[in-house]
Amino acid sequence: MQWLMIKYLVIVWAAIAGHAMGLYPMWLLLPTVAWCCLLHTVNCHDLNHAREPPPMLVRWTGYGLFCAGFLPLASTWIDAAHQHIKVHHLKTKGPLDHHDDPHSRMGRMTIPKMVLTCFLMPGHVSLEDILFHQILKNPPFWTDRILTNLAHWLQLAVLYRVGPFFPVLLAGHVGMFSLWILFSGFLHQDDFFRLLVNVDPSGMRVIPFVESIMKCVSPNAWLEIKWHDLHHSHALAQRTFGHAMARGTSYEQIDSACANLVDEGLFLDNSGKPFSPLAKVGHVPGSRKAFLEAAAKNEC
C-alpha cells in the first residue's frame, strides 16, 4: 500500500510528459492530475493508521503531491500523520465531537463558510495548516521537512519549464478541494450524518446515486465516510477500510459488517448500555436488526 504514494506521482509525471510531447491532451491531463492528487492523499490517510510509517523513499512525495495546489511549502506525510493521529483522533472519539483541531472545527461552521474554507484551505494540504498546525505545534520533523520540500521545489521547477504550470496546479487544488470538502467538511457536520442515518431504513446508509458515484471515485474512501463513527471509535483495532480491502476483503463484506457493528452501539454508558456516537442525529442501536426482522416476517 505504501508504494501507491509513488504510483500516483508516476502517473502525474507520465501525463505531464505526454502532454509536453503532444500525446496527452489538456482535457485528459487536468482530470488525471486532480484524480491522482485525490487518491494519493486518500492513500496517505490509510498510511496514517498503519502500524509502521512508510520509508523515507516514499514519504518524500508528501501528504499532497507537489501539484496539489498553490503550495510554496510541502505538506509532509509525517507532520500530517502526527496531526491526524496525535491531535484529531486523540480528541475526537465520534465524528460529531467538535474540538479546535482543523478537521472537527469544520463541524461548527455553516455550510457556505465550510465550503469556502475548504476551497481556500483544503485540510492538511494548505499553507495555514502547514505553518500554524504542523511546523509550530508538531515535534521538529526537520529531516522529513527538508527532504520533502527539496523534492517539492524541484518538481515545481521542472513543471514550470515543461508546463502547463498554473492549469496543473489549479487541477490539483480542485482535486484537494473535492477530497477535503468530504473528508474534513461534511464529515463532521450534523446535517450530513442526519442524512446518512435517516436516508436508508436498512441501516446500510445508502444514498441513491451518490453511493454508485463514490464507489467509482474511491470505494475505500467512501467506506471511511459512511462509517466514520466506526473509524473514530475503533481506529486502532480496524486501522482503515483501505487496509481491509488491501488484504482482500470485499467492499460488500466490509459494508455489511460495519452496518451490523454500528447497529450494536459503539460505546457503553456507565450502566453498560450500548449507545451510538450519532444519537444526536437520530441513530438508535438495534434499529437495523428490527428492520431486518420485520422484513423477514413480511416475506413469510
Image: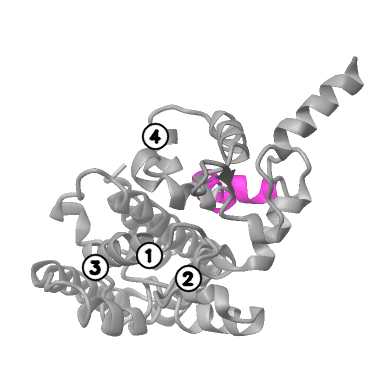
Q: Which residue is mark 2?
A: 104
Dot 1: few (<14), some (14–19), or many (≥20) neighbours within 10 Å? some
Q: Is residue 72 above or below residue 280?
A: below
Considering every residue shown, the one lying at the far front of the view is: 271
> What secondary structure is found at the residue carrying circle 2?
helix
Residue found at x 52% / y 75%: 106
Which amino acid, by three-letter code, is at mark 1? Answer: Lys
Helix, strand or loop for disc 4: helix
- Residue 284, horizontal then vertical, whole percent: 69, 47
- N-terminal of the pair, mark 1 or mark 3, is 3
| Left or right placement of residue 32 versus residue 256 in this view | left
Q: Amino acid at mark 4?
A: Ala
Name the N-terminal-most of marks 2 and 4.
2
Is residue 216 rendered magenta in the image? yes
* Bounds of the magenta segment: 211-226
Residue kind at label 3, given as amino acid type? Asp
